[in-house]
Image (cartoon, rainbow, N blue to C red):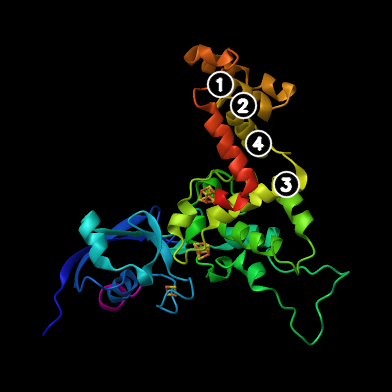
Amino acid sequence: MPESTISVPLEIYRYDPKVDSAPRYERITLDLPPHTPVLTALLKVRQDRDPSLTLRYSCRSAICGSCAMQINSKSRLACETPVGPEVERHGRIVIEPMRNQPVLRDLIVDQQPFWTQYERIQPHLIPDPAHPMPEGRENPMTPEQVERFKETPRCIACGACYSACPAVEADPTFPGPMALAKLYRFVVDPRDGRTQDRLVSIQTGGLWLCLRCHLCTEACPKDVRPSERIRDLKEMAIDAQGATEHGSKHAVGFLRNIRETGTLNEFKLVRQTYSPLEMVGQVGQGIRMWRKKPEMMKKPKKVAGWEDVEKIYRALEDSPEDRQ
Ligand code: SF4
Ligand code: SF4
Ligand code: FES
């Protein structure tokens, strides 16, 4: 029996900076079985309609990480995204190159920014010279030690998280979710000799630019959960060095603020985050906040049921693993 097909309207981003003055979208409709991967649809376009369509792929099995692209505005692997659900949800499939990296041609981006930031923070094993790796034999870890970073080795360096990340878009010096997830892996690796240095340097190296939006975790095809590892790094960095940056001061201030009264006092939080000199630059913002919420200048009172808030804090202090 012939396989049933659906009509798949594709809108494919096309741009060759050497000849095109601006990008355009090529509209092609194919009849395909609904389980067909978007990558297969693109290869069919290239084979039957337009051999100049340029894209990157290799394994076609969600292993090599080469085929990440924007599919209906989400960073996905084209080889594991079937056309059927996309057409059902959006009525068409818009295919674009990954974000946050310059387009070289059509669906291929220049991944240099991604790798430059990656290399900058050295997410690889750097043994302590005082405790060199044993020569000619393994340096084993216990199952409990491996358990702490069990998700990160699943990463296939596809860059979907980097493409989805608004912090990279706002500041290209942000290391990116993949690099930070890998950094975490070596911070908790007992064989690494740079744990403290890594935590200190990443505080000023962009860690606190992360907005905790979790878009990287949503985009990751391998469930590496980079945003959760970045949260762990933030906690470890504060434990290692205290709150030294605006981001960490803000996080610590927020926690203290809620603990004191059960409610957030935004004026106090600004004072906890900025030095008196820095607050001079915040005067305009402060006046706008005061006009909107004059009550925030008053000494906050404890909310009804504040005792329960305190109980939650104490419980979390007694069992930090429940923070997950
Ligand atoms: S959680 Fe942080 S790293 Fe992840 S996408 Fe959002 S800003 Fe980027
Ligand atoms: S963390 Fe996930 S999304 Fe990011 S590069 Fe690795 S596999 Fe891809
Ligand atoms: S082609 Fe290898 S991950 Fe898609």
Q: Are marks 1 and 4 in contact (CB under 8 Å)?
A: no
State which quarter of the image contains the N terminus. Answer: bottom left
Please state the extent of the stretch shown in magenta in the rendering.
45-53
Give residue 244's position: percent from left, percent from top.
Answer: 74, 39
Sequence-first tag of 2 and 3: 3
Sequence-first tag of 2 and 1: 2
Q: Label 3 amino acid?
A: Asp
Q: Is residue 167 visible?
A: yes
- Quote the CA–CA distance across marks 4 and 2: 12 Å
Q: Is residue 53 visible?
A: no
Q: Label 4 amino acid?
A: Val
In the rendered structure, find residue 75 and report the number of the disc placed on it.
none
Q: Residue at x 31, y 72 (%)?
A: 37
**What secondary structure is found at the residue carrying circle 2?**
helix
**What secondary structure is found at the residue carrying circle 4?**
helix
Give residue 274's position: percent from left, percent from top.
Answer: 69, 27
Q: Is residue 47 magenta?
A: yes
**What secondary structure is found at the residue carrying circle 1?**
loop
Q: Residue at x 68, y 73 (%)?
A: 142
Q: Which residue is mark 1?
A: 302
Residue 194 horizontal side relative to residue 50, left or right? right
Q: Residue at x 54, y 46 (%)?
A: 167
Q: Which residue is mark 3?
A: 239
Q: Which residue is mark 2?
A: 260
Q: Are marks 2 and 1 in contact (CB under 8 Å)?
A: yes
Give the crowd class for mark 2: few <14, some 14-19, many >=20 residues within 10 Å: some
- Quote the CA–CA distance across marks 1 and 4: 19 Å
Viewer-nearest of discs 4 and 2? 2
Q: Nearer the viewer, residue 221 or 315?
A: 315
Q: Is residue 315 above or below residue 96?
A: above
Q: Which residue is mark 4?
A: 252
When asked about the image quadrant of residue 34, the answer is bottom left
